[in-house]
Amino acid sequence: MQQANVYQDNRVALTSRVIAAKALKDLSWKQLAEGTGLSVAYVTAALLGQHALPKAAAEVVCRHLGFEPEAAAELQMIPLRGSIPGGIPTDPTIYRFYEMLQIYGTTLKMLVHEELGDGIISAINFKLDLKRVEDPDGGSRAVITLDGKFLPNKPY
């Protein structure tokens, strides 16, 4: 039977253990996702407390980390989502995403509505990808793809 969390305490504690074990074992997020059949982005989000993992994937990740079966059971629980408490984020990387939405959020909203109509882009039926590309002017650029299903509003 699927279980769910109503508080973040257990997942926050497990996330702390994941990050510590990942560092101790010198593993990458990509290595932790190996053998799960899931994307690196999804597994990373799950290990950071934002998704439930399927049983087989939770067991694979726990083997990578050297965790006990109870941790695999916790990773299968539906989490209480949301990882940025307290308003405006202070971490510089997360803040830049916030800044991007402050600058381009209304533009994205208008373009989505003009192209697709009245509705939202799902963060549930969603894919995320990040890749590094070389900048012709020197250095690197980050290409982030946010691929969410459009869900139209329906009058009732």
Image (cartoon, rainbow, N blue to C red):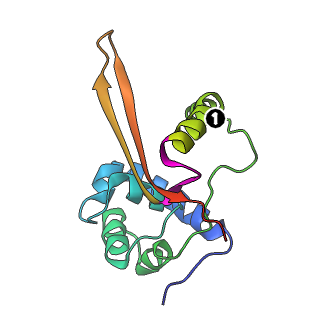
Question: Is residue 3 depicted above or below 131 in this figure?
Answer: below
Badge 1: few (under 14), some or many (20 or more) residues near its Cα, within 10 Å?
few
Image: magenta residue range = 115-124
Residue type at tag 1: Thr
Would you say residue 74 sits in the magenta stretch? no
Residue 105 image-quadrant placement: top right
Q: Is 145 situated left or right of 115 in this image? A: left
Residue 64 image-quadrant placement: bottom left
In percent of width and height, residue 33 lies at 31, 58
The count of marks equals 1
Q: Residue furthest top?
A: 137
Q: Is 83 situated left or right of 56 in this image? A: right
In percent of width and height, residue 55 lies at 37, 78
Q: Residue furthest right?
A: 86
Give the residue at x 59% y 32%: 107
Question: Is residue 83 depicted above or below 137 in this figure?
Answer: below
Give the residue at x 36% y 50%: 29
Residue 48 visible, this angle: no
> In this view of the protein, which residue sits in the foreground, 104 or 72?
104
- Residue that mark 1 sits on: 106
Residue 56 visible, this angle: yes
In percent of width and height, residue 80 lies at 62, 67
> In this view of the protein, which residue sits in the foreground, 26 or 144?
144
In percent of width and height, residue 24 lies at 40, 51
Q: Is 6 situated left or right of 145 in this image? A: right
Dominant secondary structure, magenta: strand
> Where does the C terminus fall, quadrant-wise?
bottom right
- Secondary structure found at label 1: helix
